[in-house]
Image (tube, rainbow, N blue to C red):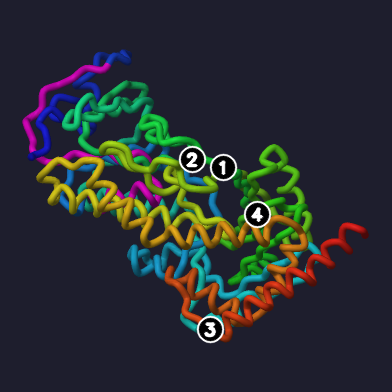
């Protein structure tokens, strides 16, 4: 069945608003447009998830609109992406601020482990600024044919039948508008309006807080290709603090689920632990943002799907979200293209579940579950954190970790080495429990 024609009865964002609305009025008006049989999609949110979804949709022949309220701003984020993302998403090297080849993990007792000994000469972790990456991905989606709508989405009106449209209500330049579409992709973050509209349910959110600190040249040289992670109750009761290098500054931050109200105190703690390394630095930006802790109960309903943070695709333990946001957006967009035969036919909920949700869960469910377990084991106490840092000093652990992270594939180890790692883990937990009690007693 061809995509319905009634989507042509509503405002097309490319048309000048002055021709459609009376001056200084917020009352929307509908206009008659030529009938089209092409599937029309709205992507709400213009970050990596939304831009990747829009690019896949537009490339596949679907009429695509990206709604982004503030294209100039970006979500607060450490900005680390795995090596495989550069090739998979054709990220040009000039966008990379730093190529991290060294990482230090510092325990509550200040035990420091160099975490990068197994990296090969051509391997590194890319550090980017989100405003640079997001703008690049959005521009590329536009080049592929997507239309960027700089607007705040205020409401999403649900279809009254299986073939009737979703109506996107938005405000652009202090003027109300509306657009009828066949499919909606929610890439609008933790407080997703799309999730609310389709009653996707709630999830637990962490809060991430970071300061961008411009350092004197001699201090910045120390972080030339180095990133640091700090663990301990002082910087976070259930996550970690970080120092990530960027072009001319470092991002110093922390995150927590259980103590969100104390986030500024935790930020003071991470700054205190690195104070001798950042002395003389100037805070140029302060950022905070909610981060989902697990997937939403519902990620597809009707002809609407959630991707990225809106769906809850942020890993435990590492807090990684950029790659999974872009990947989920692309998978969802490509799934819609397949199901609609390049925009020539209407799709339904079963298509989205088959072509997007099932494929996503088949590929990543076990990864997310495994990292959830690791976080519960190692981040629940200072004893567990000491054990984590101790284990990270072992080359086998580093090799398995980096192979899994850099290439997003299950690292293959030997049975004997895996058994030894399991025994080492148990041993570290036992030893570090003693360390933990001694620290508390002291």
Residue 205, labelled with which disc?
Answer: 1
Residue in the image at 44% along x and 41% along y: 297
Report if residue 410 is visible in the image. Answer: yes
| Picture quarter with the C terminus | bottom right
Residue 9 at x, y = what percent? 14, 24
Please name the residue that numbered disc 2 is placed on: 190
Residue receiving disc 4: 239
State whether residue 328 is above or below residue 43: below
User: Which of the labelled discs sits on residue 66, or is there none?
Assistant: none
Q: In which quarter of the image is residue 432?
A: bottom right
From mark 3 to mark 2, how far is it between C-alphas? 40 Å
Q: Can you tell which of label 1 and label 3 is closer to the viewer?
A: 3
Q: Is mark 2 on a helix, strand or loop?
A: loop
Q: How far apart are marks 4 and 2 (CA)?
A: 18 Å
Instruction: Report which residue position mark 3 lands on.
Output: 415
Task: Give left or right: position of 192 versus 438.
Answer: left
Sequence order check, earlier mark of 1 and 3 = 1
Stretch of the chain drawn in magenta: 28-57
Q: Give the label, 3 or 2, closer to the camera.
A: 3
Looking at the image, do the residues carrying marks 1 and 3 touch, with CB atoms under 8 Å apart? no
State the residue in front, 14 or 79: 79
Q: Picture coordinates of residue 160 (x, y %)?
A: 23, 24
Q: Can residue 287 be seen in this view?
A: no
Sequence order check: which comes first, mark 3 or mark 2? 2
Q: Of the residues under marks 3 and 4, which one precedes in the sequence?
A: 4
Q: Which of 391 and 361 is in front in this view?
A: 361
Say which quarter of the image contains residue 429. bottom right
Kindly indicate whether the residue at mark 2 contacts the one at mark 4 (C-beta within 8 angstroms): no
Which of the two marks, 3 or 4, is nearer to us in this view? 3
What residue occupies the far right of the structure in this picture? 442
């Amino acid at each position: 069945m061809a995509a319905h024609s009634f989507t042509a009865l509503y405002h097309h964002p490319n048309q000048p608003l002055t021709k459609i609305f009376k001056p200084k009025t917020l009352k929307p008006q509908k206009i008659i447009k030529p009938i089209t049989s092409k599937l029309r999609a709205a992507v709400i949110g213009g970050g990596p998830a939304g831009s990747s979804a829009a690019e896949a949709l537009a490339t596949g022949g679907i009429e695509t609109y990206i709604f982004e309220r503030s294209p100039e701003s970006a979500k607060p984020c450490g900005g680390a992406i795995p090596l495989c993302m550069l090739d998979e998403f054709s990220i040009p090297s000039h966008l990379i601020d730093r190529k991290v080849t060294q990482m230090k993990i510092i325990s509550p007792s200040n035990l420091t482990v160099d975490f990068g000994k197994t990296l090969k000469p051509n391997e590194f972790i890319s550090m980017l600024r989100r405003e640079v990456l997001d703008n690049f991905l959005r521009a590329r989606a536009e080049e592929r044919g997507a239309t960027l709508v700089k607007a705040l989405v205020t409401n999403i009106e649900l279809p009254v039948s299986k073939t009737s449209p979703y109506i996107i209500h938005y405000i652009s330049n202090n003027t109300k508008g509306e657009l009828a579409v066949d499919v909606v992709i929610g890439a609008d973050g933790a407080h997703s309006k799309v999730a609310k509209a389709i009653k996707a349910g709630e999830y637990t959110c962490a809060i991430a807080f970071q300061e961008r600190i411009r350092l004197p040249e001699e201090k910045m040289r120390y972080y030339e290709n180095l990133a640091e992670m700090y663990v301990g109750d002082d910087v976070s009761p259930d996550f970690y603090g970080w120092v990530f290098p960027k072009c001319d500054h470092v991002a110093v931050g922390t995150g927590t689920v259980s103590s969100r109200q104390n986030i500024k105190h935790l930020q003071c703690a991470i700054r205190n632990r690195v104070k001798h390394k950042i002395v003389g630095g100037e805070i140029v930006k302060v950022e905070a943002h909610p981060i989902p802790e697990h997937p939403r109960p519902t990620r597809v309903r009707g002809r609407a799907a959630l991707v990225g943070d809106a769906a809850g695709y942020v890993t435990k333990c590492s807090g990684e979200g950029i790659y999974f946001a872009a990947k989920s957006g692309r998978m969802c967009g490509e799934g819609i293209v397949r199901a609609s035969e390049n925009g020539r036919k209407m799709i339904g909920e079963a298509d989205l579940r088959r072509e997007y949700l099932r494929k996503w869960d088949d590929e990543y469910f076990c990864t997310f579950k495994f990292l959830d377990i690791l976080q519960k084991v190692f981040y629940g106490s200072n004893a567990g954190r000491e054990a984590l840092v101790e284990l990270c000093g072992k080359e086998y652990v580093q090799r398995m970790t980096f192979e899994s992270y850099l290439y997003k594939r299950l690292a293959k180890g030997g049975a004997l080495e895996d058994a030894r790692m399991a025994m080492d883990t148990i041993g570290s937990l036992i030893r570090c429990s003693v360390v933990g009690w001694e620290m508390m007693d002291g």
